[in-house]
Image (tube, rainbow, N blue to C red):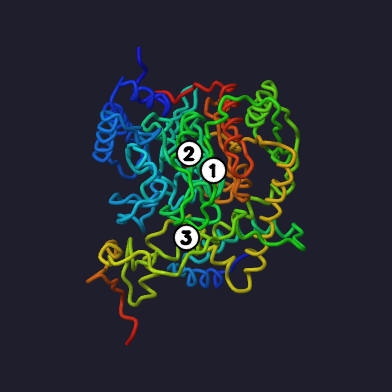
């Protein structure tokens, strides 16, 4: 299926990637080629087939729901592009 | 005369260190010099020579006390820059992680460190491990040390995504390197650079601290110049890790147990569906040669069917981007990495991600976002998960019949930088032979099989049963012995 410019704009918005209006058509052509390629799967009959969600034949482990780590906010935030006092700073979101 | 220190395998380096023929510092210095000499390959994002010498001195001090940290103690290696290394910048080849210095160490790099290996530096890679030519790195493409014969000196790609790791090992800069493989990222560059690359069973090596691409597929593994070295290095890397819930809670076998044991009595499958249309004659020739070698050593080679092979690549290009779009949502300019300001929070996210990600990464995030979006999830993502079950089922029935499967690693030798660059689907076809095993989580290895008509390396690919790397390495060592591959890139 060919993706149109409006679909690309919608995807880019969901993915939070800025795409300017004059790039939309190039992305539409580019992504359509890949979608067309993966649509080969339409030929495959999957009636009654369970989806594969993991590779191992072991079940995911459980652990007690207790705090096992922490207490070093300065380390955790040490890579923040804008951090202060052990917090992350972001543009104002509440008026 | 003793051969150059940079020509040693892991096993030979360990023997030389144990015998006192040279120190870890001498061995390391020789590799640091090689790294500086071959900087034009662009195999490293970050060189860590001071750390390397400190690691080497610590290894020498241990040996002087009669102690050893293990079979890699004092051996200089390259670390793919997808592994987080404490205090050392870890970029994933991306602008968005350019300033990122993790305060923690990935489990696998930590095991190699605790095992005494010497860190030469962080190897270049395709951005977020997305690519098959190592041309998508923000830090520039990696050059394959191999060139064609007869004066064709055009620059070749090393394959990807672990292109820096493969180039460093092939160019004798590092004795071994770590790679990661999501759809072929260890095996295809190993084939292009004439080295051994092993993708273990999914769950064998911990994914903790490795920058995530597609979490149901990503797996770390060794890249070396011999099959024995791959077994030695995997021994250090593997093992259950409670910090990765998909890490297999199984004991680690002795991976070297059956090296050199021969293949008499083993059954090797050759899947008819891998004889794809338009396959170059030289690929077919090396593949047939590999089957003949195993037959000559007493294996029974049988044709098998893996009927859903042709659907593995389209399935991969739904599943992997879907997982990537989710994993890469974390890069938002808030907690680490690049931030590009905007008028409000949403615009800051959008500007950061537009500037921080390269074209291939954006492409996969957008494909992944689309196939997971409301109204399309069932048609694409759920369908792909079901086809993935069928691909696994193919392998499960094949392994009722055979002990290992032999295929080519890649549909071509290393191509010229700039080729296949304008058509993503053409680039994706590089992984047509490696992706099926990835979808099924199976262990697989590329071993040098010979040279192409142009004099470039071609790999043979073996796929094994889940968690049976021992048999896989046994068959690989038989292929390696028969191939007797001793070609090396000119000037390295």
Q: Which residue is mark 3?
A: B362
Would you say residue B384 is visible in this rendering?
no
Q: Which residue is mark 1?
A: B200
Determine which quarter of the picture holds residue B2: top left
- The vertical placement of B340 against B72, above or below, is below
* Residue A16 drawn above or below residue B234: below
Compute the Cα span from label 2 to label 1: 8 Å
Circle 3: is it few (<14), some (14-19), or many (20+) Cα within 10 Å?
many
Residue B234 has which mark? 2
Image location (x, y in percent) of residue B370: 57, 67
Residue B257, how many percent across, how many down?
Answer: 55, 31
What is the x, y in percent for residue B415? 52, 36
Figure label count: 3
Q: Secondary structure at mark 1?
A: loop
Which of the 4 image quarters holds residue B12? Answer: top left
Classify A5 as above or below B37: below
Q: Quadrant of the N terminus of chain A?
A: bottom right
Dot 2 falls on a residue whose secondary structure is helix
Compared across the picture, whether B13 is left or right of A83 comes to right
Closer mark to the observer between disc 3 and disc 2:
2
Q: Label for residue B82?
A: none
Q: Residue at x 45, y 42 (%)?
A: B237
Q: Secondary structure at mark 3?
A: helix
């Amino acid at each position: 299926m060919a993706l149109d410019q409006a679909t690309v704009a919608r995807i880019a918005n969901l993915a939070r990637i800025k795409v300017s209006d004059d790039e939309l058509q190039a992305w539409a052509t580019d992504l359509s080629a890949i979608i067309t390629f993966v649509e080969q799967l339409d030929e495959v009959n999957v009636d009654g087939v369970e989806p594969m969600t993991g590779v191992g034949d072991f079940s995911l482990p459980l652990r007690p729901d207790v705090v096992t780590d922490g207490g070093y906010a300065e380390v955790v935030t040490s890579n923040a592009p804008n951090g202060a006092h052990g917090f992350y700073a972001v543009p104002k979101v509440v008026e | 005369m003793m051969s150059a220190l940079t020509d040693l395998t892991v096993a030979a380096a360990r023997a030389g260190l144990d015998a006192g023929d040279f120190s870890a510092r001498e061995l390391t210095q020789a590799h640091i010099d090689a790294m500086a000499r071959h900087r034009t390959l662009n195999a490293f994002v970050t060189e860590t020579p001071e750390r390397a010498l400190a690691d080497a001195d610590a290894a020498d001090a241990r040996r002087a006390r009669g102690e050893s940290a293990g079979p890699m103690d004092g051996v200089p290696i390259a670390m793919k820059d997808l592994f987080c290394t404490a205090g050392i910048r870890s970029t994933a080849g991306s602008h968005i992680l350019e300033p990122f210095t993790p305060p923690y160490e990935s489990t696998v790099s930590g095991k190699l460190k605790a095992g005494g290996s010497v860190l030469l530096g962080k190897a270049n890679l395709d951005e977020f491990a997305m690519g098959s030519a190592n041309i998508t790195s923000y830090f520039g493409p990696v050059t394959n040390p191999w060139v064609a014969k007869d004066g064709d000196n055009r620059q070749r790609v090393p394959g990807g995504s672990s292109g820096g790791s493969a180039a460093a090992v092939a160019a004798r800069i590092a004795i071994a390197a770590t790679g990661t493989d999501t759809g072929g990222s260890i095996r295809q560059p190993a084939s292009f650079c004439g080295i051994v690359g092993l993708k273990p069973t999914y769950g064998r090596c911990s994914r903790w601290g490795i920058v995530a691409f597609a979490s149901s597929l990503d797996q770390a593994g060794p890249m070396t110049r011999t099959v024995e070295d791959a077994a030695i290095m995997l021994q250090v890397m593997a093992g259950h890790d409670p910090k990765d819930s998909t890490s297999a809670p199984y004991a680690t076998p002795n991976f070297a147990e059956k090296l050199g044991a021969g293949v008499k009595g083993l059954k090797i499958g050759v899947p008819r569906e891998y004889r794809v249309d338009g396959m170059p004659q030289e690929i077919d020739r090396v593949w047939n040669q590999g089957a003949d070698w195993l037959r000559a050593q007493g294996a029974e080679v049988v044709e098998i069917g893996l009927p859903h092979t042709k659907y593995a690549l389209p399935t991969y290009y739904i599943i992997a981007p879907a997982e990537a779009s989710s994993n890469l949502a974390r890069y938002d300019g808030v907690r680490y990495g690049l931030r590009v300001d905007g008028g409000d929070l949403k615009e800051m996210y959008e500007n950061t991600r537009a500037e921080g990600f390269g074209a291939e990464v954006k492409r996969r995030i957008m494909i992944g976002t689309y196939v997971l979006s409301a109204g399309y999830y069932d048609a694409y993502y759920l369908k792909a998960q079901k086809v993935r079950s069928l691909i696994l089922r193919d392998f499960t029935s094949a392994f009722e019949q055979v002990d290992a499967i032999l295929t080519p690693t890649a549909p071509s030798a290393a191509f010229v930088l700039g080729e296949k660059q304008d058509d993503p689907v053409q680039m994706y076809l590089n992984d047509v032979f490696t992706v099926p095993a990835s979808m099924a989580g199976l262990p697989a290895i590329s071993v040098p099989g010979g040279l192409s008509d142009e004099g470039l390396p071609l790999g043979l690919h073996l796929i094994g049963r889940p968690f049976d790397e021992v048999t896989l390495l046994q068959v690989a060592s038989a292929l390696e012995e028969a191939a007797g591959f001793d070609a090396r890139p000119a000037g390295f």
